[in-house]
Image: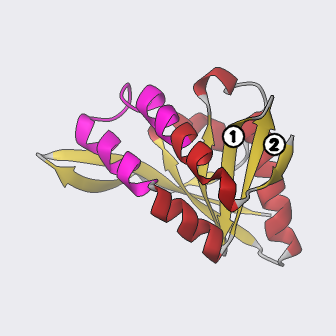
Amino acid sequence: MLRDYATTDLDQVYEMIQKTIAISYPDHYPGRAVQYFQAYHSEANISKRDELGEIIVIEKEGKIVATGSLVKDEITGVFILPAEQKSGLGRQIMLELESRARSKEILTITLHVSLPARKFYEKLNYSLSGQQETEVGDGQHLKYWIGKKRI
């Protein structure tokens, strides 16, 4: 069931995001980059996204299995538990967030695209700019793209 995030969901959303990063990202990123992602998606930053925008979740059998956020014209914090990926939940989250953006008269969505999510966003017709890089320590880099879509 897709629904709006409630502040009482914080622990469950945080744990789901951390688990997804821990499982999905090490095959694509060096250790420091994985740690960077985990720190970036802290409980404090999830709460900040809730304050500045809106968060939605998908719940199955009482467990949150997917989430995403809309903050101004940016979609962020889209995570689907690995066991639930490729089942349409990511698409459902994105279509709902795009719909909410349209209702706010936002014309173009921006997002950061991680290595494991690139094909997913391309299938949703996001155009990706050249690869970006952030230094995360010990000579390691976090690589990503900026995605944009006119809605």
For the record, the magenta segment spans 17-41
Question: Residue placed at 46% from the left, 53% from the top?
Answer: 41
Marking on residue 92? 2
Marks 2/1: CA–CA distance: 10 Å
- Image position, residue 108 (x, y; %): 71, 70
Q: Is residue 18 magenta?
A: yes
Asked whether 148 or 62 is in front, the reply is: 62
Callout 1 amino acid: Ala
Question: Residue placed at 76% from the left, 25% from the top?
Answer: 87
Callout 2 amino acid: Gln
Q: Disc 2 or disc 1, which is closer to the eye?
A: 1
57 versus 54 height, above or below: above
- Quadrant in the picture for residue 101: bottom right
Kindly identify which residue carries mark 1: 66
Query: With 139 as the anchor, is 74 left or right in this view?
Result: right
Question: Residue placed at 69% from the left, 40% from the top?
Answer: 66
Q: Residues within 10 Å of mark 2 (few under 14, many from 20)?
A: some
Q: Main secondary structure of the magenta part?
A: helix
Query: With 121 as the anchor, is 35 left or right in this view?
Result: left
7 versus 2 height, above or below: below
Q: Residues within 10 Å of mark 1 (few under 14, many from 20)?
A: many
128 versus 48 height, above or below: above
- Image quarter hosting the N terminus: top right
Q: Secondary structure at mark 1?
A: strand
Camera sees residue 110: yes
- Image quarter hosting the C terminus: bottom right
Q: CB of mark 2 within 8 Å of CB of mark 1?
A: yes
